[in-house]
Image (tube, rainbow, N blue to C red):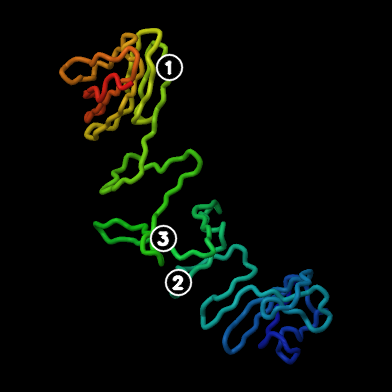
Amino acid sequence: MANFYGATNYIGGGTGTVDAIDGNNLAQGDGLFVITTAQVSFHYLNATSGAAEASPTVISPDSNAGDKRWILVAVYATGTLSNIVEDLTPQLGGDLDTNEKDVLIDTGHGINDENDLQQIIFSTTASAVNEITIKNAATGNGPEIRATGDDANIDLELIPKGTGAVNYLDALLKRAKFLDYSETVNALGDLAGGTDDIDITLGNVVTATVSTGAQTFTFSNPSASGNACSFTLILTNGGSETVNWPAAVDWAGGTAPVLTAAGVDVLTFTTVDAGTIWYGFAAGLAMA
């Protein structure tokens, strides 16, 4: 059965100090509290520690210590828990108020969920002067994720992993100003006749080559009705074979353009009603 001890100071060997307790009287799991004028601390006895003394974190008995060490568990100062050492799963009974202090997190570590799975990982830069600031908002306003710091002009970078994307899930991107942007190309290659689908989700610029037989195109996955959706088709040798377009295509002037048998044509298609009508026109014929 574990014993519990009390003391009024940590080291010095005098009456009431922790290190004055004879090691022969101590056993694994014994408890200790130390009450001073400034704080109350709690310790437990690790009988096999052997750690170097570093009061008040680690205290060795002056007599018959062996490997026995008093290990600090917690310190209460003026009614507030200020230090946790050995409790590997501490739990709070209320909100944690940092009292206008920072929380220091080692690089590569962060915040886990209730299943101990990672949610946020922090990575440090030794010479950092810039950071992000997160701000909540009142009713009718949106919260902010803002680049802040010492520099006058600071980029805010969203970087997906591998071939991943920054996916807005069809949400509105408002008041955007673009610089140095590109569009994804859906390269269909040599179609060799038959029926081929142009899936808008695979890219808003499509390249294809007509050869060896009649070619039929279908269009799929345009944006929802009420949203404009367009794509550009760069078609090589379109006039070398018969090309059949979806019935929903409404060509400029009511007639499909005559395509180039040996060269490149650029065609543009736009819909605002989820593909019920595709407005089609030739942006350029016989480009090459």
Give the amino acid at mark 3: Ile
For the C terminus, which image quadrant? top left
Front one among 73 and 52: 52
Query: Residue 18's spot in the image, x, y percent?
Result: 72, 84
Q: Marks 2 and 3: which is nearer the front?
A: 3
Quarter assignment of residue 206: top left
Determine the residue located farthest toward the front in the rendered image.
288
Question: What residue did someone put label 3 on?
Answer: 132
Question: What residue did someone put label 1 on?
Answer: 190
Question: Would you say 115 lies left or right of 175 here?
Answer: right
Q: Marks 2 and 1: which is nearer the front?
A: 1
Name the N-terminal-most of marks 1 and 3.
3
Query: Residue 262's spot in the image, x, y percent?
Result: 35, 14
Question: Would you say 63 lies left or right of 184 here?
Answer: right
Question: What residue did someone put label 2 on?
Answer: 97
Query: Residue 225's spot in the image, x, y percent?
Result: 24, 31
Under circle 2, the secondary element is loop
Under circle 3, the secondary element is strand
Asked whether the residues under the numbered discs 2 and 3 touch, taking CB atoms below 8 Å apart as contact, a structural biologist would say no
Give the amino acid at mark 2: Asp
Query: Residue 158's spot in the image, x, y percent?
Result: 42, 49
Task: Name above or below for residue 250 compared with residue 57.
Answer: above
Q: Marks 1 and 3: which is nearer the front?
A: 1
Determine the residue located farthest toward the bottom in the rendered image.
15
Question: Would you say 130 lies left or right of 49 here?
Answer: left
Q: CA distance from mark 1 to mark 3?
A: 48 Å
Give the residue drawn at x 54%, y 64%.
Answer: 126
Name the N-terminal-most of marks 2 and 3.
2
Residue 74 - label: none
